[in-house]
Amino acid sequence: MEGISNLAMLFVAAAITNNFILTQFLGICPFLGVSKEVPTAFSMGLATTFVMTTSAVFVWVIESFILVPLGIEFMRYIAFILVISSFVQLTELFVKKVSPPLYKALGIFLPLITTNCAILGLALMISMEGYTFIESTIFGLGAGAGFTLAIVLMAGIRERLEFADVPESLKGAPIALLVAGIMAMAFSGLAM
Amino acid sequence: MAKGKIEPRLVIVLTIIVMCSAVLLSFVHQWTEPIIAEHAASADAEAVLAVLPEAEETEFVSAGDLIYYKGFDGAGNLIGIALQDEGRGYEGGIRVMVGLDMEDEKVLGIDILEHSETPGLGSRITEEDFLDQFVGKSFSDSFELQNDIDVISGATASSRGVTEAIKGAIDKALEVYGGGE
Amino acid sequence: MLKLFKDFAKGLWKENPVFVMLLGMCPVLAVTNTATTGLFMGVATSFVLIGAGIVNSLLKNLIPAEVRIPSFIVIIATFVTIVDYTSRAFFPDIAASLALFIPLIIVNCLILGRSESFASKMPVSRAIADAVGMGVGFTWALTFLGAIREILGFGTLFRGTEFTLQVMGEWFEPLSIMTLPPGAFLTLGVVIGVFRAVENKSLSLTRLFGNSSLNTAKEEKSI
């Protein structure tokens, strides 16, 4: 019983109170880049969640069965980034097959998941915290859910902002950052 | 990125690059590892003296699973012991060195060895204002956040992590000294 | 020579990686709560940028196009691991406070972007000039943001070093929100806004965004 409630806590912490984007600044590029429309943002969130969860599993396997037993922890970063980029490639092929319109909409942002620091950040946290296999999976899922939540909320606000009278120099990224600042206040309120 | 059929040439190039970096990194690793380990060890030794301010000599003790340091004053009298424990903060584990006076059952000093809390926020657990409040606390105090312990505003989880680590260290120490030595 | 200088100078202002190209936003937000961490992060990133730029430019004819990006990532990761170990060995305190964000230099889009769009096409000398310029541009931007947040959030400059300056007087009540995540977003948003306003004034004939910032920052277009 306690095990389950611990896992639930881990999920909520990863998704809300330690939200990757708004409290840990992981994954800012797609957060600013793919948050103009809600449907695209949602798809991006799902693709990222998929890559996060699968990489979390594989990173755990690599960490526990290859890096640590062989004592080659200094290859950790290279191993992780290679795992992540392979998964991004797989996701790309998968999306292309299943839904060509979605593939078009996500455009150049799919390969960019590789350089999404949220995913490498997740991998590094798993190895630093020494999570178990199940914890790693839940942590990956939670982080992905939190990423999706933040990016969809942001897209919802930005759809409205289209109609607002924003000063010329604040258009685009600056106003998005200011909005993110206010969202971050709300999220850090949840953490106390 | 590579698409379509995979040519052996591509695999070979990538493998060569990975091998080269592995060789290079193993050298860097061998070169820096002892320095990093030394930092950790000297940080430990410094921390022991920091949490047992009156100690002049320390002795490393390993009793079963528990590793701790005994601190003696100039005349060779036992002042207290120092041991580590870990609590869970906001971002991850917080490793704390705690100095304890086992006779008067008081906390003598606290030092944060390792943490990964948010810089500028949770990382304020390393500031003296926060740590000094634990000095002189009795083992029987409640260590309850807000009531007994002042929390760093905006960093409840980090403050709780430190408090947990201190309580954990006290419990471990009492187990060893429980029967009286 | 003039060409080299141009390659170097564009990173400082006109194509500043942070304020104009909006690259590498994660560390820009995460490690700028003090000027110290901002500066250190800038230097560490510059080292990787320059190292990876040189190697990638030298190897540009040896690496087949299909595996160029994976190879670049491996090379970048190698340099980052070197930075990680050496900073833990020689600057343990700052390294500890940057924690996760040193390894995350690997996925800083600035580095991959410059390697892919510049170093892989240019001779070594130009690649170096470009990397140094971008590195300096990134470093000053991070230090500048860190300084603003540190002065407002702590009232000091370069905390945690021997050169700590007390900027604000006794009367100053630190605005701790500046050191928290919201402060990072708000500061960067305002600074970019001001940067653009200044640019607009000085280039009132050129349309906004009309400068040459589009070559690497594909993301920029959709922002």
Image (cartoon, coloured by chain):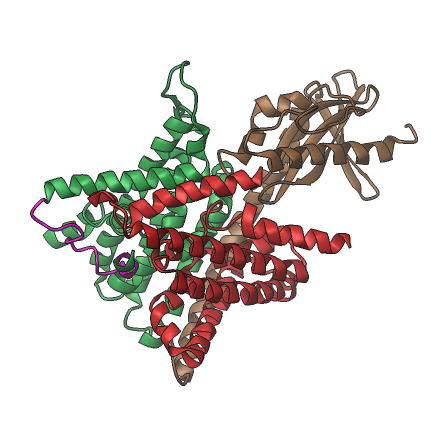
Which is the main secondary structure of the residues drawn in magenta? loop
Q: Is residue B108 left or right of residue A62?
A: right
Q: Is residue C28 left or right of residue A142?
A: left
Q: Identify the residue at horizontal 65%, vertical 32% (top origin).
A: B45
Q: Is residue A10 left or right of residue C195?
A: right
Look at the image and tell me in which quarter the N terminus of chain B lies.
bottom left
Which residue occupies the extreme top position in the image?
C170
Residue A41, picture quadrant: bottom left
Q: How far from the left and from the top, in percent, is residue C133? A: 24, 48
Regarding residue C79, the answer to whether it shows in the image is no
Which residue occupies the extreme left position in the image?
C205
Q: Colour of chain B?
A: brown
Q: How far from the left and from the top, in percent, is residue A60? A: 61, 63
Q: Is residue C172 left or right of residue C121?
A: right
- Magenta residues (range): C204-220
Q: Which chain is green?
A: C
Q: Is residue C206 magenta?
A: yes
